[in-house]
Image: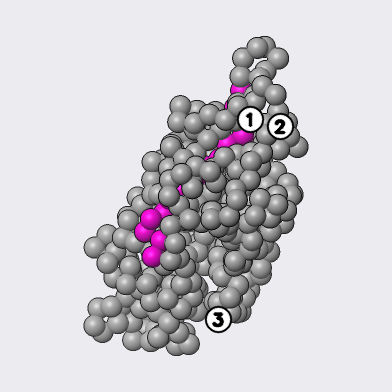
Amino acid sequence: MTTSITLKHRVSVSPIVRLPEHVAGLQWRRVQHADIPLLVELAHACNTVDSPWESTSANDYTLTFEEPSINLEHDSAIGLDAQGRAVAYGLVFGSPTHNTIIWVDLEGMVHPDRRGEGIGSALLAWQEERGQQFLAELDAYAPALLAVAAWDSVQSSCKLVEAHGYRSIRSWLELERSLAHALPTRPLPVGYRIESYIGNEEAARGVHNDAFRDHWGSQPVSQEEWLRDNQRGPTRTDLSFVIKAPTAEGSEAVVATIICAVPKEDWPARRCRFGYIQVVGVTSTARGRGLASALIAHALHAFKAEGLEVAVLSVDSQSLTGAVALYERLGFHTVRTSLTLVKEY
C-alpha cells in the first residue's frame, strides 16, 4: 500500500557503505569483469551442494553485469582467500520500475567449505546497507522490499536470512513434465489462432503487462526491457507464440502469449535436454477460454519437435489465476520450491 512518506524519509542509512572488513581472513573488493571465471568456479561449488540441477556460466554473469540497473563499483562485492580464490560474492540490484512496489534483490553465495565462519552474515549486512542506500535515494511513495531468494531445501541459507530479520512471504514452485508421454492438445475458440511470437513482440508485451497487473510483485515491463530480454540468454523467440482473437471491428488482436527458452548450458546439470517456459500470459478480458492451456500444449509439441525431452516452468504457489492446477492438468508436477524472504520499508 502506498504511504504518504517518501522513501527518502522512511529509510535511514549512512551515506558511505563500506565492504566487509576483517572477516574470516578474506580480502574484499568490488567485482570486476575479469573475476567471472572465479565466480563460475564458486557458483559450481555452491550449486553442487545447494542446487545440483543448476549451472551458472560465464555468459550468465556477463549478461547480468550488462544490466543497466547494475553498477559493479557500488553494487558488488567479492571475498577472496589468500590463494586468490573467490569464497564469497554478493550483488545488489534495484528494480528499474517503481510503479506499485520497489524491489531490491540481494543475491549472494558463500563457498560450502567456508560456511559457518560469519562470512554470510557480513555479506548480507553489507548488502542490506547498500540496498537501504538505494532506497533512500528514491523520492517515491510506493512500498519497498529488500528481497532474498533461497531454495527451501537449503535450510542454512533460510535460517541465516531469517536471523537478520527477513521473513518468508512467498513460495515458488518449479514444475516439470516429460515429453516422452502423450502430449495434450487443446482446442481454441472459433476464430482464434496461434501465430509465431516473432513479429508480434510489442503486442505480446502489452499482453504481459495486462496479464500480470494483478500478480504479486509484478511490475510493468518497458519496451526496452522487453526487447533486451528477447535477445539475451537462452530465450527462443522461434519457440514462442501468441494467440490472436477476432475483434468487433473485424481485425485481430493478440490476447495471449508464451515465451520459451532452451538453456542448453543447464542440460548437463539436469541430465536431460529441456526447454523452459518463461512466461504465459492471457489478457484479463480473455481469461476463462482455455487460451493458456492451448498455448502450453502447442509449446510442448514444439519442444518435442525440437528434440527436447522435458518441459520446465516456475509458478507462484499462490497464483490467483489457478495456474498451479492448470499446469498439473497438463501433466506437470512439482520438483522443488524456492522462497522469497523480505524486509519491508
| Residue 80 makes an appearance in the image | yes
Residue 239 picture location, percent across and down: 46, 40
Q: Which of marks 1 and 2 is nearer the N terminus?
A: 1
- State whether residue 43 is above or below residue 61: below
Q: How crowded is mark 1: few (under 14 residues within 10 Å), some or many (20 or more)?
A: many
SS for callout 3: helix
Which amino acid type is shown beneath numbered disc 3? Answer: Ser
Q: How far apart are marks 1 and 3 (CA)?
A: 43 Å
> For this rendering, which residue is in front, 60 or 248?
248
> For this rendering, which residue is in front, 302 or 93?
302
Residue at the spot of label 1: 255
> For this rendering, which residue is in front, 197 or 88?
197
Which amino acid type is shown beneath numbered disc 2? Answer: Ala
Residue 30 picture location, percent across and down: 32, 66
SS for callout 1: strand
Q: What residue is at 49 percent from the left and 75 percent from the top?
A: 50
Q: How far apart are marks 3 and 2 (CA)?
A: 43 Å
Residue 69 picture location, percent across and down: 43, 49
Which amino acid type is shown beneath numbered disc 1? Answer: Val
**Residue 125 appears left or right of 336:** left
Residue at the spot of label 3: 156
- Is mark 1 in CB contact (under 8 Å) with mark 2? yes
Location of the C terminus (image quadrant)? bottom right
Q: What residue is at 61 percent from the left and 23 percent from the top?
A: 253
Any mark on residue 286, and which? 2
Q: What residue is at 71 percent from the left and 32 percent from the top?
A: 286
Q: Earlier in the sequence, mark 1 or mark 3?
A: 3
- State whether residue 180 is above or below residue 84: above
Q: Give the range drawn in magenta.
A: 253-268
- The image quadrant that residue 235 belongs to is top left
